[in-house]
Amino acid sequence: MPVARPETSDARVIAHVDMDCFYVQVEQRKQPELRGLPTAVVQYNEWQGGGLIAVSYEARRCGVKRSMRGEEAKAACPDIQLVQVPVARGKADLNTYRTAGSEVVSILAQSGKCERASIDEVYLDLTDAAESMLADAPPESLESIDEEALKSHILGINREDGDDFKESVRDWICRKDADRRDKLLGCGIIIVAELRKQVLKETEFSCSAGVAHNKMLAKLASGMNKPAQQTVVPYAAVQELLTSLPIKKMKQLGGKLGTSLQTDLGIVTVGDLLQFSETKLQEHYGINTGTWLWNIARGISGEEVQGRLLPKSHGSGKTFPGPRALRSLSNVQHWLNQLSEELYERLSSDLEQNKRIASTLTLHATAFRSKDSDSHKKFPSKSCPLRYGVTKVQEDAFNLFQAALREYMGPFGTKPQGNKKETWRITGLSVSASKIVDIPSGTSSIMRYFQSQSTIPSCSTSGCLQEHVAVTPSASESCSEQKSAETEAAMPPDKDMSITDTSPDLDNSYGNMDMVPEKFTCQDVSCQSNEATEFPTQSGSNKGTQTKTSGQKIKEKSRGMHSVVDIFKNYSAAPRSKQETQEDSTVSLTSNRGSLSSSTSHSSEMNKEVGDRRETEWGYKVGEIDQSVFDELPYEIQREFRSFLRPNKRPNAGKSKGDGSASSGIAHYFPPLKR
């Protein structure tokens, strides 16, 4: 079935803003004496002067490239200034650059829909702003246009020899006979120029930009004239741009697909794609990819700017090239702990500042096996639900690595065979958190329902922390681990919650349970709750009667309880009558065989009746309880629940002094609750 062709969106105004050599600019802002000098930011590793991760344009003019080491860069440019990247946990710390990038985003986001693509690049949808400008103050009516806008590079402008560059730009922007698409682009030129000036003024960072009708063209244009310039792609100049553009320069064509286009179809430039029909491309690469290739060859892209100011994932990684490759599980675990600590620091910051949580933890690694014909095999990536808490992230990351290593090496590859040592080497590690979403409003930690007060007053976000991080516990995790203060986030303001009281001892056992609704009633546990809570009974002569207990009485009775089982015992049927208690005593104390037989028979009937009542009283059946539920609880709580639901018989519970044939009454399994 053919894929629907995306709309061309010719009338949209999209900008791609790219910071100029951003890491260097951040360091130059900290050290102003470096401005104008050839500068490079290098890794902390001092081998051969460290690897270059950012190079200023002054140094690039001297032949310095990012692929060089520090010593090589000095040989090419003796005056180059090498600044070491900040270091934390034995690796580069990019938080300074992330924070600086956020400064830029906060400025750009004021003019339209903004999508932060990375630390130093942003997409803007300026269509609404351009249409407003076109309606209120069209470019042809402006008495003057800012110099920064007049320095724009507009593709497709026909200039005669001797024409003034700025005047040519002014004439194009102010054309009265231009179609609506070009008029909107003219407004976009003025808006983007003003934004770039504002960024420079407020942050001291220069940036370049591309302005076009879609994200793909704007991205291509932003890198054409750097630094501190902007390039515009009118609709009429699209083919001029793409005809000579190398296929590998196009986004998503730098890898295997681009190589396949070159080797299989002989395509060198994007313009070469025009000679192939959409059907032909679909035959080679499938319907979706074939249609996409046909569209991009014509400058068509339906991808919209996403309104996202925050990153959609967090990650922390490190490479271990050459002799520094990791060779043992202990070394891998050490570095995974460091990476996980950094990752969790960012997750905690995101939770505190933006009220967002991530749900998936992923491990990536690169590796090789020496003296192995299958050494090219890719080290598999592994994912699992993300649990909040730095030790949990570290534990899960290492478990994921071990699972991936077993798959990579084979069933017995991770163990030495005789005198043969392990042959794997790890050359890169990274951990990432993804599927980040906002915390739903009206949610709170389940711990709020196991506290010693009936209500919690409303408070401001900055002044009141609550433990409402949603986590998915893994099978290897015990809920007995105490909650960490790192997982506490601000409590939503002006939210009143009704709290059911229990012992504070439970607070340490359930700090990381899943979130539950703010408004919690007994309906959540298959019963109804109003001003008075009613619990129907179904046993003996009391069948059909109800016990009414006010919320205040429940609170008073539950105060001082020592076990979560006690909470459920509070919700039992009507209290056992004196007659029932006496009957149970008769079972355990009588020495008369006839009387014992009669009591045993009555006790058996009562056991069955009470057992049936226990299975239906709270809306569950003992036999249908998922075993994994118990596995998630602390051992002590597991033991109490199991003894409560399936009590073990006492060795001598049902025996009288003279006879061992009698069975125990139900009273021996459920001792009276100590108030």
Image (cartoon, helix red, strand yellow):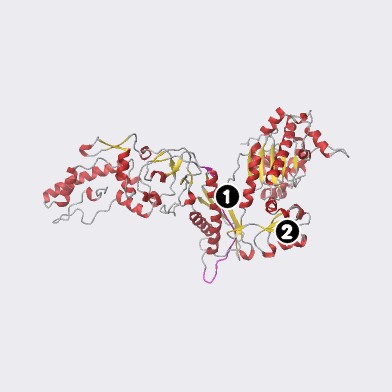
Q: How many marks?
A: 2
- What distance separates the C-alpha of mark 1 from that of mark 2? 31 Å
Q: Say which of 58 and 273 sits in front.
A: 58
Judge whether residue 282 can be spotted in this image. Answer: no
Q: Position of residue 278 (x, y in %)?
A: 69, 39
29 sits to left or right of 390: right
Question: Where is residue 508 shown, x and y percent of the image?
Answer: 40, 52
Q: Residue at x 15, y 54 (%)?
A: 656
Residue 663 in the image, given as x and y percentages of width and height: 20, 51
Say above or below: 423 vs 5: below
For residue 65, which quarter of the picture?
bottom right
The type of residue carrying mark 1 is His
Quarter of the image that includes the N terminus: top right
Query: Label 2: few (<14), some or many (≥20) within 10 Å?
Result: some
In which image quadrant can residue 274 be found? top right
Q: Looking at the picture, which amino acid does disc 2 mark? A: Gln
Image check: 613 left or right of 638?
left
- Per the image, the residue denoted by label 1 is 314
Answer whether residue 195 is magenta in the image: no
The residue that mark 2 highlights is: 81
Can residue 198 be seen here? The reply is yes
Can you say whether 563 is above or below 216 in the image?
A: below
Residue at point 38%, 47% (across, down): 626
Give the residues drawn in magenta, as a range: 417-438
Q: Mark 1, mark 2: which one is toward the viewer? A: 2
Secondary structure found at label 1: strand
- Disc number at residue 198? none
